[in-house]
Amino acid sequence: MKAPTPARIAPLRRSRWRRARRLRNLTIGGSIIAVLVAVAILAPWIAPFDPVKDADLNNYLQPPGDRFPLGADLFGRDVLSRIIYGARISLGVGIAVQASALTLGMTLGLLSGFYGGWIDNVIMRLAEVIFAFPGLLFAITIMAVIGPSLYNVFLALGLVSWTSLARLVRGQVLAIRQHEYVEAARAVGASNARIIVRHILPNTTASAIILVTLGIGGAILAEASLSFLGLGAQPPTPSWGSMLSTGRDYLLQAPWLSIYPGLAIFLTVMGFNLLGDGLRDLLDPRMQT
Amino acid sequence: MPRGIWGFIARRLLLAVPVFVGVTLVTFALMQIVPGDPVALLMEEKMATVDPAAARIIRAKWGLDDPVPIQYLKFLRNAVRGDLGISYRTDRDVTPSILERVPATAKLALAALVLAILIGVSMGILAALRQNTFFDSASIMLATVGVSIPNFWLGLLLIYLLAVEWRWLPPSGYGPAWPYLIMPAVTLGTGLSAVIARLTRSSMLEVIRQDYVRTARAKGLPDRRVIMTHALRNAAIPIVTVVGVQMSGLLSGAVITERVFSWPGVGRLLLDSISVRDLPMVQGCVLFIATIFIGLNLLVDLSYAALDPRIKYE
Amino acid sequence: MSTRMFQRLAAAAIVALTAFALIQPTTAQTPAYGGHFRRALSSDPANLDPALTNTSRAIAVKMNIFDPLLRQNPRTLELEPGAAESWSVSQDGKVLTFRLRRGIRFHHGREMTADDVKYSIERILTPELGSPFIRTFDRVVGAQQFTAKQAREVSGIRVLDPNRIQITNSVVDSTFPLSFSSLYIVPKDEAERLGRDFGQRPVGSGPFSFVSWSRDDSLLLRSNPNYWEGRPYISALEYRIIPDSATAQAEFDTGRLDFMLLSDATYRRYADDEKWKAYVVEVAELFTRHLGLNTQKPPLNDVRVRQAINHAIDKATTVRTVLQGKAFVATGVFPPSLNAYSRTIRGYDYNPQRARELLTQAGFPNGFEMDLNGSSSPVTGRWLEALQGYLTAAGIRARIVQADFGVVLDRANKGEVMSYVLSVGGGSNCVNWLGPFRSRNFGAAGNRMFYKNDRVDALIDQAERTFDTRRQIQLCQEAERLVVADAPWFFWNYNKAALVHQPNVHGIIGNPLEMDWIRMDKVWIQPRR
């Protein structure tokens, strides 16, 4: 009773492209993400120091200056370099989590839609429970079981993020199953796999892209929250979330430890959100998530 | 009220029972797998010796000597009678411990919700009315900012600015008056207000374009009334949906907000209980949260009936 | 005299008088009565029953509600009278006789008697209560029978008269009298009446009585005007529960907390600030932070490897930077504030060269891999990172593993980890300090390094049996020397406990046993003008 089935995509016309250019969300969001990806890829070349190894305790808590443009942390490591490398981790978190969510969601959604019956019931009830239950608490409990580490963060967050995608895919499957051309295809002997690839996937792609883009921002924020609670990436990994979390103990003594990672998280998540919004306006304005 | 609504409610409540059982089973199983001995966790970091004799006695007291399935069955049997057990950490009954914290979380959640709806809806309306102007872009940008900030960061920033620097508000605490409620409510409600703002805007834009609005205008009804009555009505359902959907996000956020602002709510209780493996308390909190959600979902579905006369209940 | 002259003289006189008044020294500070004192706790005390509480936060509260039988002087760490005004030990060292002070009244009015003392001890031995302190008293004659429900009372605890009680131990243990400084006396009638509720609505005889408790929010105590040591200065004591350290700092800075404990992150900010320096109270705490090395896991079973680890880390720099100067470098087991501290122990200097040499001798020229375990608190995280850096430089590839404290402890107890960061103490008695090195304490009882040295065992046994302090210290120091040579720990640092208080707060005395344990009845607030 929650998400209505997504509308189909109308073929793109030139007027739409003009509108796209006017859609500031898309351009701003896209540029931010482009910068982020570039920084992540080029990290070893643009970072002035090694984020982990260049740790000289004698430089502890250096304020921003000539040597360390954004200051140094408690172990004498350059904050700027750690933020640059942190881009890799944040992108990694977002992508890994959404990739797991996508895989899990598509699989379960397909199973649910194709086979129906009790499989559908079980999967959808499970999705409802997970969707309704506070995701963070779920993630915390899972982390408590499997232990805090960056990889476990991927797993835990992935396990709570698949529900919208599953529902999306299932909806598509149900909608398509009725269509005549599918019946015709089946009559001709086309396998399920073919139907999935040729009919279902193309129609879900746009909405899935939107959900995933918006979900990446959410995953990055969730990692920050988990780090705040002491679960999450272990030292010396330079994840922005753990930098923000450790920096807050020194908020008054060394504010640069928390301001810059916080800014990085904020800009990145904003970029993904703007991009997602822009994509939504472009591809499927009537979709409600 | 549409007919068949009592049957609907009854059916939903009946369906809730297996959900409850399932939830307790999953929680119980998870807490068994979780590494960490509750007895050891009672000891603090500096008092690190756990006497084996004492540990044995404490474990017997908590009923941890029974085989695991028996423990679960005993728990179920007691739960049905309303007895959720005794907390390992405080040696106190679980139920009153949870109930006494409910008002705090409720106040916070309600305040955040009200704030989010007020701010979100107003911003959304204004943005829709002034579509494609600077105000529109600015408010949507602001809304996006709202969902892009880690909420503990926002909370700490607010504390340092409003409490320490400018001394306008008390930094934290569960005070009786509204100054204590503002910052936590804002911190918690920011994300939701952003979502509501965008939703309101898009719903209203949809309506504004629709024919019947044009028709109503043609009839000569004043602009404002047209918008208020038709457009808001249309936006109401998606807003209610989103609020229902976002409630879990609100509780997640509450866990963090309650910690930052020293707010004694259920979220904090659950968090503390998980970290010391206080199984009875974790079970109790989880059951409580499940109850709230089932109730809320029901409420959301019921409010559809009130808002959209087209919806029937089979 | 002309009018003008008169006016001038008058003016001058007025100026002179005013100046004189202004430069008068302020009156000496005499303690003022009254005031609502607020302090913070990082989490809820959970339960205030003295038999159940053993977190430092809960003890910080309960020591103001209850009286212990004996006390430890925070400055000298000597045992002093508490609720008992005197005590004696028999010739054979097994029988302790206490004489209770007269006129101590519980908060509900009744006078304390030796029956209450007996009840308080038997309570701890009652299995239904599940007290973690059972071990403390279970070697009293008849205790085990009582716990096993074979006897209705503990035969070794005898009430001689309403004010005298005699306790017979089954073994000779010179640390036994010390246990009575953590025995808090509860009123028998109230404890029985309230049952399990007693921990939520405690009734004691201490300087403050319980008023109300809003869980996870605040705990309120009121001063006890009839306290036997004199009425406390402050009239109300409030413990506010503030879990986040940044929030606590905000509360202190805005004047809403009267003192705040300092961590390594916040210490420098107040200790270096001209405005706050004078209000920082520091004390060398009786805890040694160390990296425990599991001697059963190769290559840590080779003493040379363990010694290499000790040489590999620059303790002084880590203390200066990561710990922000809020600690003292450790040479051995005992901290300087302990009477058994030895100045002649050499310990291990920072010598990465020597570390590599030792590793090569032991057969690891290219180092090896090990895990570094610690709790998931941010502070511990910092320590682990610091250690990891130096170990890596010496060729030891150390992997950090953080988990909830109980999990770490559990794993360490079972011998599943190679190393763990911990902070342990032993109170004021060196025998307790050496507990972790006794082979009979493998695992949960404290010896998580699974270290065994027969000579060390023998020395500690001897020290435990002697009541002669000097001889005890001698034996302890000899044992410490052997332990340091065997290096089952990386001996890192002793904490410098510190707190900062508002300028108008007086009378706070730092307690080396645990900074949190402050006698609030001696604290007073100068009312703000």
Image (cartoon, rainbow, N blue to C red):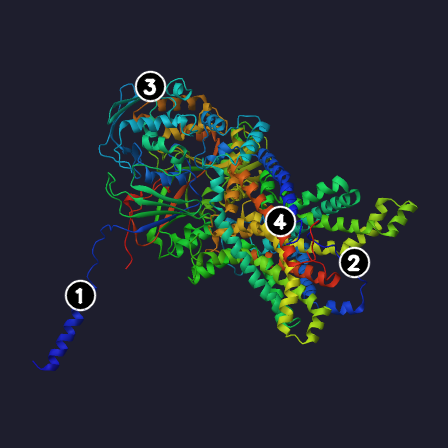
- Name the residue tied to disc 4: B298
Q: Gap in Å between the C-alphas at discs 3 and 1?
A: 73 Å
Identify the element where label 3 is drawn: loop
Q: Residue furthest left?
A: C1
Q: Gap in Å between the C-alphas at discs 4 and 3?
A: 63 Å
Q: Are marks 1 and 4 on the same chain?
A: no
Which label number is shown at residue C155?
3
Q: Are marks 3 and 1 on the same chain?
A: yes
Label 3 with label 2: CB-CB less than 8 Å: no
- Give the residue type that dot 4 points to: Leu
Q: Residue furthest right?
A: A188
Output the chain of dot 3: C
Q: Quadrant of residue C83?
A: top left
Which label number is shown at residue A8?
2
Q: Gap in Å between the C-alphas at discs 1 and 4?
A: 79 Å
Q: Gap in Å between the C-alphas at discs 2 and 4?
A: 31 Å
The mark closer to the camera, 3 or 1, is 3
- Name the residue tied to disc 1: C20
Q: Residue furthest top?
A: C150
Output the chain of dot 2: A
- Give the residue type that dot 2 points to: Arg
Kindly identify the residue that appears in the image at 26 percent across and 19 percent down: C91
